[in-house]
Amino acid sequence: MTKKRNRTRPALSLQERLDKFTQEARAAARKLPAGAERHTLLQKARDGEAAAEMERLLSSPGPQHPK
């Protein structure tokens, strides 16, 4: 017998989840002293910001033709 897929939708949109992830990573990095772990968290925050920006660009309607 096959396993049934969980078909629930996320409570937050992708944009909201990326923003939340970025904020949490930055907050966690602020609590750490300078070092490799802090650098990794800041890099993840930058990656989250880049992903959010790409998602914004891809989901935008783009240039519209005049009617």
Image (cartoon, grey):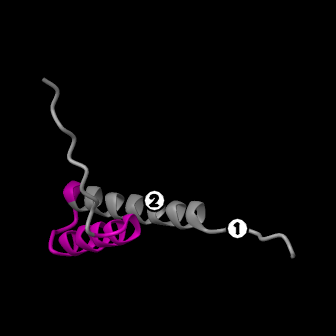
The residue type indicated by label 1 comes to: Gly
Q: Secondary structure at mark 2?
A: helix
Q: How far across and how far down the image is residue 47, in percent?
A: 40, 58
- 2 versus 54 height, above or below: above
Residue drawn at x 66%, y 68% is: 61
Per the model, the C-alpha gap separating discs 1 and 2 is: 18 Å
Magenta residues?
12-37
- Badge nearest the viewer, 1 or 2: 1
Instruction: Residue at the far right: name it.
Output: 66
Q: Secondary structure at mark 1?
A: loop
The residue identified by callout 1 is 62
Q: How far across and how far down the image is residue 64, in percent?
A: 78, 71
Counting other residues with Cα less than 10 Å from the Cα at mark 2, is it few (<14), some (14-19), or many (20 or more)? some
- Magenta-drawn stretch, dominant element (helix, strand or loop): helix
- Residue 30 left/right relative to 54: left
**Quarter occupied by residue 4:** top left
Numbered circle sitting on residue 51: 2
Q: How far across and how far down the image is residue 44, in percent?
A: 33, 58
